[in-house]
Image (spheres, rainbow, N blue to C red):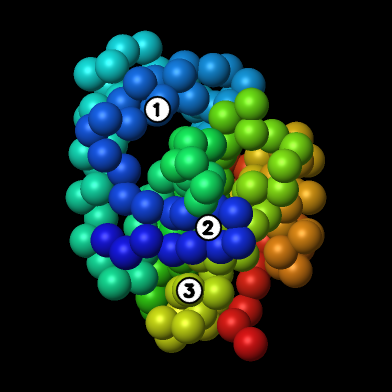
Amino acid sequence: MRTIASDRLLLRPWRDEDADFVLDLESRWEVVRFLGAQPTTMNSREEALASIARRRAIDDPVHGIWAITTATDGQLVGNLLLKPIPLSVGEPAGGPADVEIGWHLHPNAWGHGYATEAAAAALNDVFGRGLTRVIAVTNPDNHASQAVCRRLGMTRLGRTTRYYDTTTELFEKLAG
């Protein structure tokens, strides 16, 4: 998987040695509370290693799940994903899968603009690789992520139950 750079950040593949960070990040309710229909906290280093293995298993020229690090010292600050999004049960497929962008950062990294910068770098990269549309879904109460979507120039399309078997706010970004 490729590395994506921005002014202050590097998005790089996850490594096994990142397991302690993943456990710290995803054992925090304030980080995972808006992830999926039934958020759960991570409880062990083994879970972290398994999560890293799943993140690395995405072998695609466009999609991926990256560790977000600071460019100057390589400090881990969070996670960014860009991958096909699962439809809710009963939703008709048809056509190519929608591609979702998402992020979650360690609370120590909140408020520095890292989510917006990392997502903008990833969007520039994938649009340059030919992807024409990316969506983001947020929990209706996740106002911080919705603000990131707006800063990225994403268009709010309203509430939907199309993904993750739950109600989300849907945002869209088109190439160009």
Q: Which mark is residue 22?
A: 1
Asked if one can make out residue 164 in the rendered structure from this viewpoint, the answer is no
In contact (CB < 8 Å): disc 2 and disc 1:
no
| Placement of the C terminus among the 4 image quadrants | bottom right
Tell me the residue that label 2 is attached to. Answer: 101
Q: Residue at x 64, y 57 (%)?
A: 117
> Dot 3: within a 10 Å radius of its alpha carbon, few (fewer than 14), some, or many (20 or more) residues?
some
| Of callouts 3 and 1, the N-terminal one | 1
> Dot 2: within a 10 Å radius of its alpha carbon, few (fewer than 14), some, or many (20 or more) residues?
many
Tell me the residue that label 3 is attached to. Answer: 125
Give residue 167's position: percent from left, percent from top: 63, 43
Give residue 48's position: percent from left, percent from top: 30, 25
| Of callouts 2 and 1, the N-terminal one | 1
Instruction: Give the residue type at disc 3.
Output: Asp
Along the line of sight, the residue nearer the viewer: 50 or 87: 50
Residue 96 sits in which quadrant? bottom left
Assign a secondary structure to mark 3.
helix
Instruction: Give the residue type at disc 2.
Output: Ile
